Image: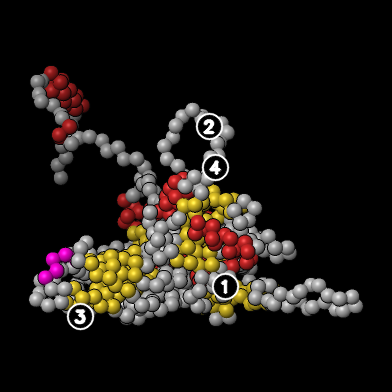
Amino acid sequence: MTQFMQTPAAQNDLEKITQETMNLMKDATTTGFTTADGLTGFGLEPVAKLIYPLVTPFLNSIPRKNAGQGSAAARWKAITGFGYTKQRPSTSFGAAGNLVKTVEQDFVAPYAPLSLGDSVTKDAQTLARGFDNLRAKSGVKTLYELKTGEDVMAIGGQNFALEAIGTLTATYSSTGGSITNGGASAVTWKFAVAARTTEAYHYGGPGTTQGVNGDDMLTAASTAVTVSVPAGATTGSVALTVPALVGAVAYDWYTDNGTGGNLYYTGITTTVNAATITAAADTANAVAPTADNSADTETFNGYMATLVGAYSSAGMVTRGTSSARSSGSYITSLDAKTLTGNNGSIQEIDNVLLYLAQNFQVSPTRLVVNPQEAFNMTDKMFATGGYRVMLQAGKQQDALTGGTYVENYINKAWQGQMLKIVVDPHVAPGTIMGVTDMLPYPDNTISSVLEIETQEEYTQYEYAANRQTGAGGGPRYDYEVRSIEVFKNYFPAGGFLLQNVGNG
């Protein structure tokens, strides 16, 4: 094999030619490079930004503790003192006093796991090298998502079914919509409604597969109500109302479009127990549910469920429909009416506070509301006067600032106790929750009325690298963030719900 060796002289000649060429290029007149050539740097900042809301004020306010002992349910006993026969203390000399009645109640609250998962392929991790650590970021974003869902469950998880929906009322109007009838005789339309819990409001709904085991998490639809649409009607609408369903925060509305066939989802979900249907439903939408799937048997009962139902040895069960529940809590519906401002306060809230003061000698410590209700409450209170403006020390007072916000609410029935107004987006619009965090009763041994007790705190599991056939199948790392917990409410009687509050 012949080898060609380059002499030192030849090497020097090559370098000389190269340098001469470069000099000529510098002196030559040329169009040069422009930005259109695409020869630019790529100024990518390292690490992807987590622009993800983590707004969980209700969850953040609840103390957490580890159960210490393994168990399928948390159990406790209480001497309630409610429901007893009051005994007159006056008595004659030499006579024994009346005996005090003791009322003891057992409480059982089953634990439930909360868990979400994610995965990162090995190829994705490799190609992100020097930019971001996808495996670490996967755990963080999964924890954030779990905490967001945990806030929803702490507010509105419910492992028992809502009650059956009452009789629907429908009123036809010849104006206000496009419910028409081009025929020569009247046509009968049918309408129905189904209801959702807070959990179903966020994770379920008609036609979705996000519910428990793939169901829609709705109640069975109400018995259909009929409306006659007259012949020749070129416009029309139907106003619907249904009796408030205790614990429901949203209602889905259905119609058969005058065909006498299936009732289809109209595309309208309201957070009050009323709706106006102005157009025919899309027949590609989901049909009205015939079975009740409103219970999530895989979860614990959150705050609203502890007010709606009552603890028992079988878990949580519903108890009647009166505003004063067997749990002692107060639940009432405004039936789509708006809040009533009254001398700087809200009449409907004052009514509940007076009830709690008179019956249980207690005052809630905060109101937890959707941003919509915070907005409406502020407007109602400022429109009727009677409020106090709290000036903050150190602030410039000579600058005008537009807008107002009510941060606290004074309980006129309980020595002016201040209630904090807390905004939580996971409380459905149209619902106001009253929460009591502390009890004034002597020797109650309850440090906090609300508590989350865990068998397992937030734990991240990273499974061994694995694979499966197909896109995204691997090699990959699978992750899961998990907890096992229960929500405990030691005094449901101290809470209240105002529901079906109209917007405005």
Q: Tell which residue pokes out farthest to the top in this image.
A: 27
Determine contact: label 3, label 2, CB under 8 Å.
Answer: no
Q: Residues within 10 Å of mark 2 (few under 14, many from 20)?
A: few
Question: Is 190 included in the stretch rendered in magenta?
Answer: no
N-terminal of the pair, mark 3 or mark 2, is: 3
Q: Can the viewer see residue 417 in this picture? A: yes
Distance, label 1 to label 2, CA atoms, is 46 Å
- SS assignment for the magenta stretch, majority: loop
The residue at the point 49 percent across, 52 percent down is 342
Q: Which residue is mark 4?
A: 388
Distance, label 1 to label 3, CA atoms, is 42 Å
N-terminal of the pair, mark 1 or mark 4, is: 1
N-terminal of the pair, mark 1 or mark 3, is: 3
Answer with the quarter of the image where residue 222 lies. bottom left
| Quadrant placement of the N terminus | top left
For label 2, the SS is loop
Distance, label 3 to label 2, CA atoms, is 65 Å
Camera-side residue of 121 and 364: 364
Q: Which residues are magenta?
A: 232-236
Determine contact: label 1, label 3, CB under 8 Å.
Answer: no
Q: Residues within 10 Å of mark 3 (few under 14, many from 20)?
A: few
Q: Nearer the viewer, mark 4 or mark 2?
A: 4
Camera-side residue of 80 and 286: 80
Q: Which residue is mark 2?
A: 395
The residue at the point 53 percent across, 64 percent down is 496
Amino acid type assigned to the residue bearing label 3 in the image: Gly
For label 3, the SS is loop
Amino acid type assigned to the residue bearing label 4 in the image: Arg
Q: Which residue is mark 1?
A: 327
Camera-side residue of 475 and 327: 327
Distance, label 4 to label 2, CA atoms, is 17 Å
Q: Which residue is mark 3?
A: 261
